[in-house]
Image: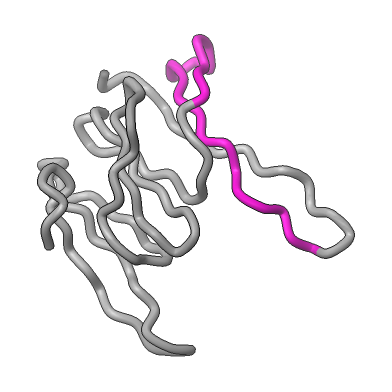
Amino acid sequence: MRNVVVYAKYPNYGPTGNSGPGRIWVAAPNGEHRRFLTVGCLPSLSPDGRYVAYTSGRKVLVVPTAGGRPRVLGRGDWGLTWAPNSRYLAFVRLLRLGSGEVVIDDAESGSG
């Protein structure tokens, strides 16, 4: 499943300025065969193309690119970065305003 792209489409900003979560899609590199995957933000495709990591409600989740049930890795906010072997995922967890920590989780087992 290496030859795929993943992207999020976000609703237009409303009068409150809040756009809400996006819809995450998977497609062939030319944009054909697009398929809805899940709802969330900041999708990141694993280097081997098997998984998509994303955020939703201050949680980091991973779902197979082929579809299936998302798995929560932990609390996190942004900066989703895959290790080259697609096993580990690093992300930032905010502790308080202006302070955060980098978390590295095993994307396959879910343990940090």
- Secondary structure mostly seen in the magenta stretch: loop
- Residue lying furthest top: 33
- Residue lying furthest right: 15
Q: Is residue 41 left or right of residue 67?
A: right
Instruction: Name the residue: 33% across, 70% down.
Output: 92
Residue 94 drawn at (x, y percent): 39, 78
Q: In this view, does 3 lie to the left or right of 28?
A: left
Residue 13 drawn at (x, y percent): 79, 53
Tell me which segment is drawn in magenta: 17-36
- Please tell me which residue lies in front, 62 or 46: 62
Taking the magenta stretch, the answer to whether it contains residue 30 is yes
The N terminus: image quadrant: top left
In the rendered image, the vertical position of residue 86 relative to residue 93, given as above or below:
above
**Number of on-image labels:** 0
In the rendered image, the vertical position of residue 17 relative to residue 22, given as above or below:
below
Instruction: Name the residue: 46% across, 20% down.
Output: 27
The C terminus: image quadrant: bottom left
Residue 24 drawn at (x, y percent): 51, 35
